[in-house]
Amino acid sequence: MRIAVVGVGGVGGYFGGRLAQAEEEVIFLARGEHLHALHAHGLHVESIKGDYTIHPVQATDDPAEAGIVDVVILGVKAWQVREAAQAIRPLIGPETCVVTLQNGVEAPGHVTEVLGAQHVLGGLCGLIAFIVAPGHIRHAGAEPFVRFGELDNRASPRVEHLRQAFVRAGVQVDIPSDIHAALWMKLLFITPWSGLGAVTRAPVGVWRSLPETRAMVTQCLQEITTVARAQAIALPEDAVEQTWALYETLPPGGTASLQRDILAGRPSELEAQIGVVVRLGRQGGAVPTPTHTFLYSSLLPLESRARGQVEFVV
């Protein structure tokens, strides 16, 4: 398959690298020093599943130079999705699909608004990975996986072809029976981790071990499941228990990407993760979300500072 990876961070770098390693035709869309490093030294991925380097690398900052592809893997941050969807128009042919791998539940809708639903596959992924330096990605924890599907949950040849590509790449891949429920299950997993991690500045091994922070996480999980069901999302009855079981498998030093971004003073996915729970809960005044409202309000000053909207010394 001819695959464009847009956003060569922890997600795009790791999964795009694995696909390239499996000899799929992968074109990386990157900018600045990251792009220069890819051209000069290739893509180096340091991973708990084995380090590897892709060199030479097909990489460009110009989607028109890349041309039409079969699949676009959208690995940018959630708040960059609309801009990225506009920029990738030259990659889109009649049969091209765009896989959204962002945290949150809104990215498929944002891409649909720009490119049309016929080009969108809802998707999600999981791993602890980040940029160490230009051209250098570190996968530090968790078994990497991807899940994706048509927005109407029908089986399709393009979904199966992409699934097979990930299988060839040795990546755990699954096609959920309900992609929207799967997206909300990922939100259920990542949002309390992100919020508690950012507010406490503690890794998962700390906040899951203290009764006080465990209680806050459980409150978050209950709020999200209530909001999801108010949105007619068919979450499993044991969604909270499933999520706690996953938390217990995480490495004790694990941190979420939103947490790392906020603590480093970078713009984060605050709106896409914690903010979306508060916003959807407020629709019609139906679902109170006091714990998420506290987390969102507490982190908003740092988010505003990172975006240049306010100034203060930390």
Image (cartoon, rainbow, N blue to C red):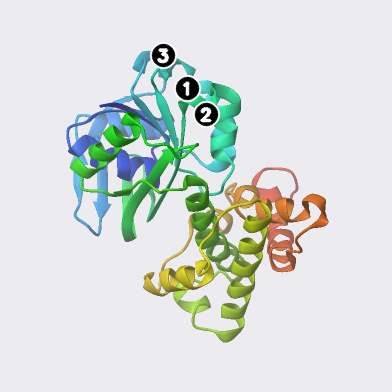
Q: Label 2 to label 1, Cα distance in Å?
A: 6 Å
Amino acid at circle 3:
Ala
138 w.r.t. 60: above or below: below
Report which quarter residue 199 is drawn in: bottom right
Question: If you read the primary sequence from the N terminus, does the residue marked by circle 2 or circle 3 appear first?
Answer: 3
Q: Quadrant of residue 302?
A: bottom right
CB under 8 Å between discs 2 and 1: yes
Q: Earlier in the sequence, mark 3 or mark 1?
A: 3
The numbered disc on residue 64 is 3
Image quadrant containing the N terminus = top left
Q: In the rendering, at what x and y percent does residue 4 appear? A: 35, 28
The residue carrying pointer 2 sits among few (fewer than 14), some (14 to 19) or many (20 or more) residues within 10 Å by Cα, namely some
Q: Residue at x 19, y 33 (%)?
A: 55
At label 1, which amino acid type do we have? Ile
Q: For this view, does 31 lie left or right of residue 106? A: left
Picture quadrant of residue 49: bottom left
The image position of residue 178, as x and y in percent, is 47, 48
Instruction: For mark 2, give the secondary structure.
Output: helix
The residue at which mark 2 appears reads as 84
Above/below status of 210 relative to 108 = below
Per the model, the C-alpha gap separating discs 2 and 3 is: 13 Å
**Quadrant for the C terminus in the image:** bottom right
- Measured as percent of width and height from the top left, residue 158 is found at 33, 30
Categorize mark 3 by other alpha carbons within 10 Å: few (<14), some (14-19), many (20+). Answer: few
Q: Nearer the viewer, residue 281 or 2?
A: 281
Q: Disc 1 designates what residue? A: 88
Residue closest to the eye, 232 or 194? 232
Helix, strand or loop for disc 1: loop
- Mark 3, secondary structure of its residue: helix
